[in-house]
Amino acid sequence: MKTFTELNLIEPLQRAIAGENYKIPTPIQSQTIPVALKRRDVLGCAQTGTGKTAAFALPILNRLGLQNRSAKAKRPFALVLAPTRELAVQIGDSFATYGKHLKLRHALVYGGVSQTSQVRSLQRGVHIVIATPGRLLDLMNQGFIQLDKLEVFVLDEADRMLDMGFMPDIKRIIRELPAKRQSLFFSATMAPAIVEITDKLLVDPVKVDVTPKTRSVKKIKQQVIFVPRKGKPELLQRILSSRGDLRAIVFTKTKRSANFVTERLNKEGLKAAAIHGNKSQNARQRALDAFRNQFVKILVATDVAARGIDIEGVTHVVNFDLPMEPEAYVHRIGRTGRAGAKGIAISFCSAGDQGDLKSIEKLIDQEIPVNQALSVTLPSPSPNSTRGRTARGRTGRKSSGAGRSGTSQGGRSRKGSGSRGSGDESTDNEKGKRTTKRRRRRVRTEKASAVKSARTGESSSKKSSKKPGGGKRASGGVGATESTAKRRRPQRKGKNARSRANASRSE
Ligand code: AMP
């Protein structure tokens, strides 16, 4: 499919698309729209940023535009479920944009705000409802919306719905839908639980997959910086003040941490706004608008709140905390490097984060280059501490003979990188593991004493341990992976140890 004209969409839609200056359909659009127009069910594996909103919005608008019926009070013809308010708002904007030459009405239904105006719209009658599950169920239970006339049902970001525990609500909503309907499901990943529900809910769906993860993340310049947890705020500040034209989204694991980081940045004169689930809808929208309009250059977000945010011109994504789910990493860094623009994704990795880092690298099938200039040698934790057990042997390090410039993605050979390098290789087979463990123990001991010495000011050891925000730094810092070098693979971590690590890190 080369052009939108070949998609046989009705003229008002063609006009709206031309108005948006879309030249050719994106892959998800060219594969989804023709089959959706034929009223087939679709299971799309696609992330935000691929143009998936138009992939479901255009067929819905086409169908309802052709039918040309007036809207019925409380009884929409199409329902789109989205996991977050922000995504619902964005989807609503897309419907407004693509449907601007049609006489179709849509309503947004989401929590965190008064329901009065939502109820009023529903009573007046809308063709399309875009909703988050909780508020929709609320309004259904109060009798303000009935889904018996529904013809098209869209479930967007199904994997996130699952993560956020919305599945019971969604199942309750689906029970109210007519059996004869068209269903379009989209998910960034196809976890077994998603496959299970789609098997039950979709009828002979056309499967469309446009998210080869490794390809999408390779467009973005990634780097990891090893830093103790306590050093993260200072490092963040340093990175964010290094470029005047910077527009960054900083991801934290918890809402509390998002508030803390935002306050600290503002205190330092770096204008930042926070967006997370504890903020009211209005506060979240205000923060998003401020970032969109560039009144603030830094948006500090948790995963849930940032889901689906589509803002152009984000130069940096900083993972202040690594996400616990590796898939979230792909979503996070996808906030930058959009529409072919250059983007940098920087991840802070403290001792306890290294298991998460390893999971991420496994998922994206590449090693993230280390920013050696900004990385420190992480201390070996005490053997008795919980963190110690999980962080064991996972120190970021400067590898002497293994230094390599550039940021090659995924092609990091461990061969020829000296004794430590061959130790890395050996993590891949059982025999080598024993040798590696012995080496690592030795290296850890050396590093621990080096760090201790550096802390107590012994000049001889200072070179091996740099303090974040102090000591020798690469000029500019941000985006500088020039001194990228090989890094040892983290040890395998058991599931229990991993959750202990996560628990110990959550604030
Ligand atoms: P989405 O994945 O739906 O969030 O879309 C991501 C961005 O791509 C949005 O800003 C859309 O306006 C834009 N977009 C969608 N389809 C196209 C297209 N065919 N050509 C150019 N931009 C598009």
Image (tube, helix red, strand yellow):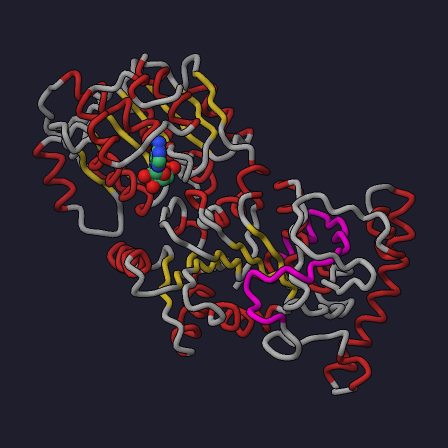
Tell whether position 473 is magenta: no
Magenta segment's dominant SS is: loop
Q: In the rendered view, does 441 fall on the left or right side of 286?
A: right
Confirm whether residue 280 shows in the render.
no
Q: In the rendered view, does 353 fall on the left or right side of 46?
A: right
**Image position, residue 145 (x, y; %):** 18, 32
Confirm whether residue 206 shows in the render.
yes
Residue range highlighted in magenta: 474-501
Q: In the rendered view, does 102 fall on the left or right side of 94?
A: left
**Image position, residue 392 (x, y; %):** 76, 61
Which residue is depicted at the point 41% across and 43% down? 339
Tell whether position 495 is magenta: yes
Q: Nearer the viewer, residue 304 or 148?
A: 304
Which residue is depicted at the point 39% across and 53% down? 313
Q: In the rendered view, does 24 fall on the left or right side of 97?
A: right
**The quadrant where residue 223 appears:** bottom right
Which residue is depicted at the point 74% across and 87% down? 457
